[in-house]
Structures are given as structure tokens and as C-alpha cells.
């Protein structure tokens, strides 16, 4: 398990009291009969997404390790989601994620 995956799991457990949260899984490959498939989402789509229980607002969390840096596409996606009224930010720990979800403050960038 990577460090980012571990942080994702910790965040999912910590924020589940305050929201319904999902992990985005993507991939590409071939079916058993040779057909190509792709389960991609838009460039920069956040690792975790869901709905805040208190008010039904959409929630997007980009998970990064302490040294991880978001891509240009990830930053743009979060900006667009905030502009549309969602709670969205970059979180490097469960504590940051709880702060983002509960207080609507942007997490560390």
C-alpha cells in the first residue's frame, strides 16, 4: 500500500461521520473478448468525492502525501468545483480533511 493510499483510507474513515464519501477508481484495459474499455474521469478529478450530510453540498478531496504536489489539472478542477459551490481542497492528513469538511476551509495547498 502506498503512503497516499494509506492517507486516503484514513481520510475516508475520519470524514465518514460528516459526509458520504467515495474513492474514485479509474482504469483502462481489454475485456475478455478483446474489446478496449476506459473508465476515466475528467483530467484532475479528485481522489475522493461525495456529499456533505449537514447541507448536501458536493465534496471533493485531492489526497496528497506531505511532499506531494498537485498537478495543474487538479488545481484547476478544485477551483472549478469551489466556484460551482462545492467544498473542495487538497488534504495531506485525516485532520486536514475533517477541517475541510466541517469548517469549509481550504486545506493546505
Image (spheres, rainbow, N blue to C red):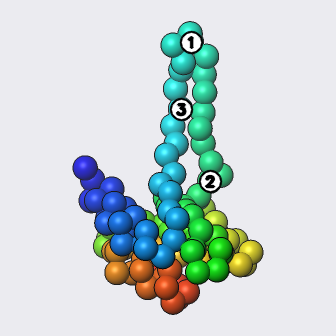
First along the sequence among labels 2 and 3: 3
Identify the residue at image location x=34%, y=81%: 95
What's the distance in space between the residues labelled 1 and 3, CA to CA? 12 Å
Q: Earlier in the sequence, mark 1 or mark 3?
A: 3
**Among the two numbered marks 1 and 2 on one chain, the one whose residue lies closer to the N terminus:** 1
Mark 2 to mark 3: distance in Å?
15 Å
Residue position marked by numbered label 2 in the rendering: 43
Q: Is residue 43 visible?
A: yes
Q: Which residue is mark 1?
A: 34
Mark 1, residues whose alpha carbon is within 10 Å: few (<14), some, or many (≥20)?
Answer: few
Q: Would residue 83 appear left or right of 2 to someone viewing this image?
A: right
Instruction: Count the labels in the image.
Output: 3
Looking at the rendered structure, the secondary structure element under dot 1 is loop
User: Residue at horizontal 51%, vertical 13%?
Assistant: 32
Q: Which sits in the foreground, 14 or 7? A: 14
Which numbered tag is attached to residue 28? 3
Residue 5 in the image, given as x and y percentages of width and height: 33, 56
- Locate residue 92: give its quadrant: bottom left
The one of 59 and 70 positioned closer to us in this rendering: 59
The secondary structure type at the circle numbered 3 is strand
Q: Which mark is residue 86?
A: none
Image height of 96 relative to 8, above or below: below
Q: Residue 26: x percent and y percent?
A: 52, 42
Q: CA distance from mark 1 to mark 2?
A: 26 Å
Q: Residue at 43% of width from left, 85% of height from top?
A: 99
| Circle 2 residues within 10 Å: few <14, some 14–19, many ≥20 | few
- The residue shown at (64%, 80%) is 55
Q: Where residue 48 appears, x then y in whole percent?
A: 50, 61
The front one of 55 and 12 is 55
* Residue 44 at x, y percent in the picture: 58, 58
- Please indicate, yes or no, whether residue 71 appears anywhere in the rendered image: no
Q: Is residue 26 above or below residue 69?
A: above
Amino acid at each position: 500500500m502506498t503512503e497516499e493510499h494509506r492517507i486516503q483510507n484514513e481520510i475516508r474513515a475520519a470524514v465518514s461521520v460528516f459526509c458520504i464519501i467515495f474513492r474514485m477508481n479509474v482504469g483502462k484495459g481489454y475485456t475478455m473478448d478483446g474489446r478496449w474499455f476506459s473508465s476515466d474521469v475528467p483530467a484532475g478529478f479528485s481522489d475522493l468525492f461525495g456529499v456533505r450530510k449537514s447541507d448536501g453540498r458536493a465534496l471533493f478531496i485531492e489526497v496528497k502525501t506531505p511532499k506531494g504536489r498537485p498537478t495543474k489539472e487538479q488545481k484547476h478542477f478544485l477551483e472549478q468545483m469551489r466556484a460551482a459551490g462545492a467544498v473542495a481542497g487538497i488534504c495531506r492528513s485525516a485532520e486536514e480533511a475533517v477541517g475541510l469538511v466541517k469548517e469549509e476551509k481550504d486545506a493546505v495547498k
